[in-house]
Amino acid sequence: MLGPVPVDFILFAFTLLGVALFHKRTLEVALTGLAVILLYKFLFTGFRQGAGLAGFGAHMAHEWVILVNLLLLLLGFALLSRHFEESHVPLVLPRILPDDWKGGFVLLWMIFVLSSFLDNIAAALIGGTIASGVFRGKVHIGYLAAIVAASNAGGSGSVVGDTTTTMMWIAGVSPLSVLEAYVAAGTATMIYGVFAAKQQHAYSPIMKDPPAGIRVDWARVGIVAFILVVAIVANVVANVDFPEVLDHFPVIGVSVWLAILVTVPLRKPDWPLLPATLKGTIFLLSLVAAASMMPVEKLPAASWQTAFGLGFLSAVFDNIPLTALALHQGGYDWGFLAYAVGFGGSMIWFGSSAGVALANMYPEAKSVGSWLWHGWHIAVAYVIGFFFMLAIIGWHPDAPL
């Protein structure tokens, strides 16, 4: 302890501060931070499961599934988004999107709906690909933040839309209990969506008409659809019929890659895209691994105030262990928790896997200062959405699971 704060937290805080200050060296900072935290755990405190290599091995026996799933999904969905880009669908969307700022607003709602049944990483990358097409490759950082927010908001009310809500479903939370999160998520999207769409319109207006001679590559569209269907089916089947398997094998990530490999004869994926994507992926895995070793053994008493605070904590701390702790503790209104830990990570670019995935596509987003300055409306929308749901629905904690 250093005063009332465990040294582990101080080391992790310095790592996050380094990421914020040296946004062009985020991978190096994250790996250095992870190495320092590991050294400290080995030399002084040990791990939650024990000391030394045995404790570390027991810790990784639980964490490796999460890390491998993230690795496979971030790399796989990067290839999927390139298939979607090369299908030319993003270039023909100006035919159906409004011509003014409302085009960007409608696109955010499309991402929101996609994320209700897709993984939020896929929804964010598809949204980023469409934005690049319809805005001629010039996407405002405030709008990038809104794309991430829409993908996280859309997944917050669906047990198949986000890892945290899927965890709640596996633990026995009713899908209807999570569904109420859409009251807050929808309200928030109405707020940040307007501001972000107007930012984007002032920066680079949407194309009024698609370029001449554009033809859709329907084979690539079919590949994208096939990969997404496989991911959804694998997720649902595993949760319903084999929930215990999810804790011991990266089902969804492996399913996505099997679908990618099966479709190679139809269209070759953009394999050269992987090295650059891998750097961003290792960055996220480093932060997730470091966060998993923090001594977060207990949360404050379950209340709406605690749930509200967890939203801000999720912007800098992995929301998976936070959700696991909340499920173990019980006494939460699960709709509020789903919104807080799901949407809260949107406030900083590395606060969610969707944000890291989109930052791999748009490296200029890897600046905490720019993200906070131009994406200020995300935090404001989070607060308004939370208190709107509190006023309309009220806090109704569920019985412990």
Image (cartoon, rainbow, N blue to C red):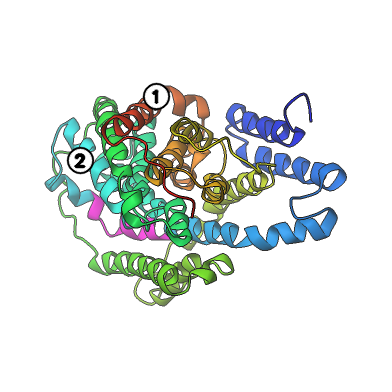
Out of 269 and 366, give the one closest to the viewer.
366
Given the image, on which type of amino acid does mark 1 rest? Trp
Viewer can see residue 124: yes
Identify the main secondary structure in magenta.
helix
Nearest the eye: 109 or 136:
109
Q: Residue beneath label 2, please? A: 106
In the shown orientation, is residue 208 left or right of residue 178?
left
Q: Which mark is residue 119?
A: none
In-front residue for pair 50/219 = 50
In the foreground, 169 or 234? 169
Image coordinates for residue 167, horizontal then vertical, percent: 47, 56
Q: Secondary structure at mark 2?
A: helix
| Residue 300 picture location, percent across and down | 57, 35
Can residue 126 be seen from the camera position used here? no
Q: Secondary structure beneath disc 1?
A: helix
Q: Residue furthest right?
A: 43
Q: Which residue is mark 1?
A: 376
Question: CA separation, marks 2 and 1?
Answer: 20 Å
Mark 1 neighbour density, 10 Å: few (under 14) some (14–19) many (20 or more)? some
Q: Earlier in the sequence, mark 2 or mark 1?
A: 2
Magenta part of the chain: 79-90
The image position of residue 309, as x and y in percent, is: 49, 31
Q: Amino acid at mark 2?
A: Val
Residue at image point 69% right, 34% down: 9
Residue at image location 31% in from the left, 37% down from the top: 184
Q: Residues within 10 Å of mark 2 (few under 14, many from 20)?
A: some
Quadrant occupied by the N terminus: top right
Rendered image quadrant of residue 378: top left
Does 15 sit above or below residue 161?
above
- 3 shown above or below 176: above
Q: Specify the farthest residue to the front.
A: 399
